[in-house]
Image: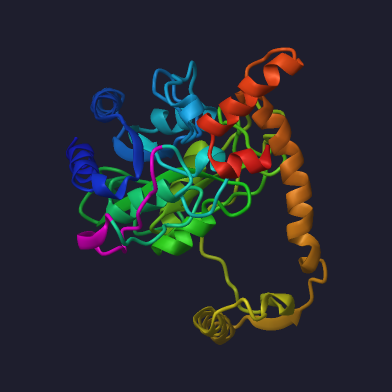
């Protein structure tokens, strides 16, 4: 229970960063007690507000859903709860996951923990988006858990209540979603790990869709080990999602030799848009891999030029279909055009109106 209480304390302390839309402290305490009864170790989690959570407000950061109470819980969220996850709150985001700054939502912008706290009212840094609330929650320790870690990663990774031969760690993790960078982007902005599993590894049932063919549940955490823990806890085939495959992901924590491995460096990615700092970091990473025995090879990806164009064509077709359900289901007549225009103007941000 101490880790849950600490997470709640931090969530209250750092409210000014606006990382949470809905706080669920009472639920977290109840879940912690239930987890202990079942022999599980409770840990705090923050979940992006585009996942259904039964009897909890689920808004997608939109005025249109500002009072929507989900009737069921997303599959992967249920799996987290069964492993001892305790919901601290639903994370703030860009409306319907459309954005890269976490500033385009009905509940106000998320503010990066790297911002000057004395000037949060007028001068703050973006945490990236659309899963910016998840990133900031992990960054500030709102989604943290005290656990034990086995020293031998080849055995079961997440081992609790071991004898004194273990080390003590504090873990940070949250559940986001990623369509075109929505978790990897805020992870980069907040100095964290952002991991998007291959499409089909994790169930999308209960994830309010933006682009069905590209949406992926994803993880933001402080370590690759934490990403691995969440992935193992959530994976598995789901009868409610026809795109979810029965292919357990490999464990990150198993040591594998990289001597002789070939690592490609796409030459198209080195262009005028890449900052000197990023280029320096990229080079240093390549040199470090080479020193470990990897073969560094320049490769060409000529389709890079067309990738963003193809993304927009595919994504916006799906978005148009999915967002149609956000309007009243009525037969369109001339007399109803004005009410729908007014609804769009009042209930949705400009980025949503432009897409739809």
Residue 145 is inside the magenta segment: no
- Would you say 275 lies left or right of 159 here? right
Residue at 45% from the left image edge and 51% from the top image edge = 220
Q: Position of residue 237 (x, y in %)?
A: 63, 31
Where residue 238 appears, as percent x and y from the top left, is 62, 27
The reply to whether residue 21 is visible in this rendering is yes
Measuring 60% from the left and 34% from the top, which residue is drawn there? 203
The kind of secondary structure the magenta stretch mainly shows is loop
* Residue 193 located left or right of residue 96: left
Q: Which residues are magenta?
A: 107-121
Picture quarter with the N terminus: top left
- Front one among 26 and 253: 26
Q: From this view, report whether residue 143 is shown above or below residue 320.
A: below
Query: Observer-nearest residue: 271 or 333?
Result: 333
Rendering quarter of residue 41: top left
Q: Percent position (x, y) of residue 338? A: 65, 23
Residue 5: x and y in percent read 18, 38
- Is residue 252 something that shows in the picture? no
Please, is residue 270 above or below residue 6 in the view?
below
> Which quarter of the figure is the C terminus placed in?
top right
Q: Which residue lies at the image location 37% right of the left edge and 40% below the top edge?
A: 46
């Amino acid at each position: 229970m101490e880790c849950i209480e600490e997470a709640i304390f931090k969530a209250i302390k750092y409210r000014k960063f606006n990382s949470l839309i809905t706080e669920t402290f009472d639920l977290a305490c109840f879940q912690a007690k239930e987890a202990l009864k079942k022999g599980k170790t409770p840990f705090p989690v923050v979940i992006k507000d585009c996942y259904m959570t039964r009897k909890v407000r689920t808004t997608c950061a939109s005025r249109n859903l500002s009072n929507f109470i989900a009737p069921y819980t997303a599959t992967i969220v249920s799996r987290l709860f069964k492993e001892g996850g305790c919901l601290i709150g639903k994370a703030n985001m860009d409306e319907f996951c459309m954005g890269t700054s976490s500033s385009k939502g009905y509940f106000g912008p998320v503010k990066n923990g790297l911002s000057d706290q004395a000037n949060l009212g007028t001068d703050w840094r973006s945490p990236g988006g659309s899963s910016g609330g998840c990133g900031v929650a992990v960054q500030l320790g709102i989604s943290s858990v005290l656990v034990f870690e086995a020293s031998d990663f080849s055995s079961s990774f997440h081992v609790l209540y071991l004898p004194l031969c273990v080390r003590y760690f504090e873990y940070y993790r949250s559940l986001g979603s990623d369509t075109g960078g929505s978790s990897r982007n805020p992870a980069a902005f907040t100095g964290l790990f952002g991991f998007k599993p291959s499409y089909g590894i994790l169930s999308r049932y209960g994830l309010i869709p933006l682009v069905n063919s590209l949406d992926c549940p994803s993880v933001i955490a402080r370590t690759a080990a934490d990403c691995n823990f969440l992935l193992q806890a959530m994976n598995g085939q789901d009868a409610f999602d026809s795109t979810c495959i029965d292919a357990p992901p490999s464990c990150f924590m198993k040591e594998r030799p990289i001597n002789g491995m070939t690592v490609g460096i796409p030459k198209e990615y080195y262009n005028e848009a890449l900052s000197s700092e990023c280029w320096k970091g990229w080079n240093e990473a390549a040199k470090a891999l080479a020193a470990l025995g990897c073969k560094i090879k320049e490769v060409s990806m000529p389709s890079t030029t067309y990738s963003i164009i193809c993304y927009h064509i595919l994504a916006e077709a799906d978005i148009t279909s999915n967002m149609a359900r956000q309007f009243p289901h009525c037969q369109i007549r001339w007399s109803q055009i004005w009410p729908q225009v007014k609804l769009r103007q009042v209930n949705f941000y400009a980025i949503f109106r432009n897409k739809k």
